[in-house]
Image (cartoon, coloured by chain):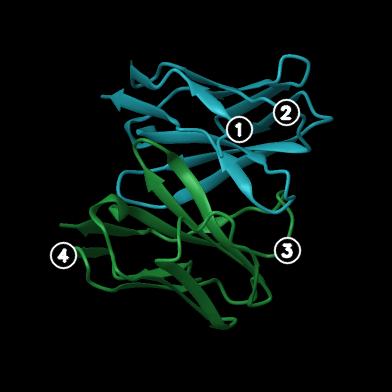
Amino acid sequence: SQQGEEDPQALSIQEGENATMNCSYKTSINNLQWYRQNSGRGLVHLILIRSNEREKHSGRLRVTLDTSKKSSSLLITASRAADTASYFCATEANSGYALNFGKGTSLLVTP
Amino acid sequence: DAGVIQSPRHEVTEMGQEVTLRCKPISGHNSLFWYRQTMMRGLELLIYFNNNVPIDDSGMPEDRFSAKMPNASFSTLKIQPSEPRDSAVYFCASSDGGTGAEDKHFGDGTRLSIL
């Protein structure tokens, strides 16, 4: 079952611009993760933010979490063509071990 | 270091045939997950193993699907008989630990087409 829902479904920008993707979820969470999927490949873990954190950085990535609005955002600064991929948010399922993924945002970065 | 290895990468077969997908998790990881990805439904968890024991198979669509993990370094997902609606990309993922907080390491998937 899906918990997270990404917005927009697709995003097209030029190299050097910033890309912002949003994720909304329905129930309370312990943490939220973002993954990237390149075409024809598996998902790669990018960053995890815990429910008591509001913002986290990793290189060109910035993730925010607003538990009152049940939403998170992923910002990629100074985008590169290599950032072209689908990006998924994932929340911990009620089971406590699995992840529920959204349907993803497809990002296209053109040179 | 080697990541999660899945085989085959692509499989095309006719409906009614048996399909076996294989996965080698990262050495030392004690949790293994099988996911299915389709455009319509996104990523769905099929089954979760911990220490080679199936813990949750509630996501397995029906009796035509079965999964095994005979040892810590190998798992299979079998579909018998296969149907066109089983066409999807099947991912295996492993992690070190049994909570939702650990990074899940995904293989590159098996793209399955049932004709």
Q: Secondary structure at mark 2?
A: loop
* Amino acid at dot 3: Gly
Query: Between marks 1 and 4, how big is the CA–CA gap?
Result: 34 Å
| Whether marks 2 and 1 lie on the same chain | yes
Measured as percent of width and height from the top left, residue B93 is found at 52, 60
Q: Which chain is green?
A: B
Query: Between marks 4 and 3, how big is the CA–CA gap?
Result: 38 Å
**B43 is higher (above) or lower (below) than A64:** below
Q: Are marks 1 and 3 in contact (CB under 8 Å)?
A: no
- What numbered label is drawn on residue A3? 1
Q: Which residue lies at the image location 47% right of the left edge and 67% below the top edge? A: B4
| Residue depth check, mark 4 versus mark 3: number of the one nearer the observer | 4
Which chain letter goes with mark 3? B
* Amino acid at dot 1: Gln
Q: Are marks 2 and 1 in contact (CB under 8 Å)?
A: yes
What hue represents chain A?
A: cyan
Q: Which residue is mark 3?
A: B97
Residue A2's image quarter?
A: top right
**B92 is higher (above) or lower (below) than A12:** below
**A22 is higher (above) or lower (below) than B24:** above
Query: Between marks 2 and 4, how big is the CA–CA gap?
Result: 41 Å
* Amino acid at dot 4: Glu
| Residue depth check, mark 2 versus mark 4: number of the one nearer the observer | 4
Which chain letter goes with mark 1? A
Residue B13's image quarter?
A: bottom left
